[in-house]
Image (spheres, rainbow, N blue to C red):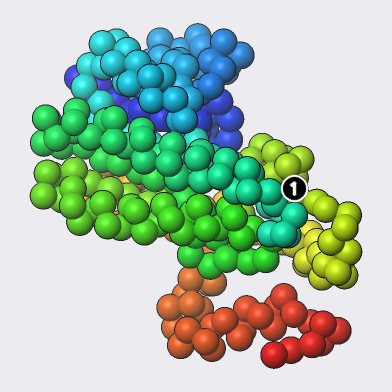
Amino acid sequence: MKKVIFITGASSGIGKATALFFTRLGWNVIATMRNPEQETDLSNNPNVLLLQLDVNNSHSINTAIEQGIAHFGPIDVLLNNAGYGQQGIFEAISAEKVREQFDVNVFGLMEVTRALLPHFRARKQGTIINVTSGVGRVTVPLVSVYAASKFAIEGFSESLAYELESQNIKVKIIEPGYIATPFYERAKADFAFDPQLSDYNAFQQNMENLFSSFAAMETATMDDVANTIYTAATDGSYQLRYVVGPDLQPLIDLRNSKADQDYVNIMRSQFMPKAFGNH
């Protein structure tokens, strides 16, 4: 019997790339998204079931799971991929936007996981793979709310992994570095800005110049992430974290090799040039 993966946020980016990758390797894919009627790349594949799912709507979550099992049979892997990145100066981000970030990235992920756990427990097997981000381990300015949501998923996943090992259920974390996906187009469009916060103008311009220079760096692709997700789904191990991208691993190595304040001082030196003063 073919293996089955259930993917949230499969309409674009890493989610869609992973759906296509798994179908090429013979898996059945339950590809969920908020507007499946708009999807064309996956719609004609007999190994793909397109379903509507909003991670903030429990009814749609439960319905998608029931329909997926009825169509393909037992689910082997859950990929929690749905999410977005709220960027900008923290003071410019409204309380409503902060809650929305956590509703989607954290609480939505938890609800999908909660809904599928009884199915995994009944089978005494299953793998949960949560896509976080490099900024869930080594954060930078202008992503405080997004990073907070990803730090939350890291902590949730690590604790949950210990619990679920007792049920023969594995939990994995995928940590991509910078990946060129539509994710960043939305992040740029939703970038929080408040013209009254002019005190930050010089700092923000400096950060934009710095981050623009990252575009020339060697980075991973969406297929690299999909391949890593496949490895996490099939390697049979209890490995918790999988780092994707040559830009991210050196920063994680730096954090792990330095005393905490030494690491913070090194990072601060990158974001706080002499023109702004050092502390």
Image location (x, y in percent) of residue 278: 74, 89
219 is higher (above) or lower (below) than 120? below
Image location (x, y in percent) of residue 105: 49, 43
Residue 224 appears in the rendering: no
Q: Quadrant of residue 265?
A: bottom right
The residue carrying mark 1 is 191
12 is higher (above) or lower (below) than 201? above
Which is nearer the eye, 223 or 183? 183
24 is higher (above) or lower (below) than 212? above
Which is nearer the eye, 129 or 275? 275
Q: Which residue occupies 11% across, 30% down?
A: 122
Q: Which residue occupies 38% across, 19% down?
A: 59
Q: Which residue occupies 70% across, 51% down?
A: 93
Which is nearer the eye, 235 or 67? 67
Q: Is residue 255 left or right of residue 193?
A: left
Image location (x, y in percent) of residue 207: 78, 66
Which amino acid does the dot numbered 1 rest on? Answer: Phe
Which element carries disc 1, helix, strand or loop? loop
Crowd rating for badge 1 (residues with CA inside 10 Å; few <14, some 14–19, many 20+): some
Which is nearer the eye, 94 or 11? 94
* Residue that sits furthest to the front in the current view: 95
Q: Quadrant of the N terminus?
A: top left
Q: Quadrant of the C terminus?
A: bottom right
Q: Which residue occupies 36% across, 28% down?
A: 6
Residue 115 appears in the rendering: yes
Q: Is residue 209 left or right of residue 160?
A: right
- How many numbered marks does the figure carry? 1
Image location (x, y in percent) of residue 180: 65, 45
Q: Quadrant of residue 231?
A: top left
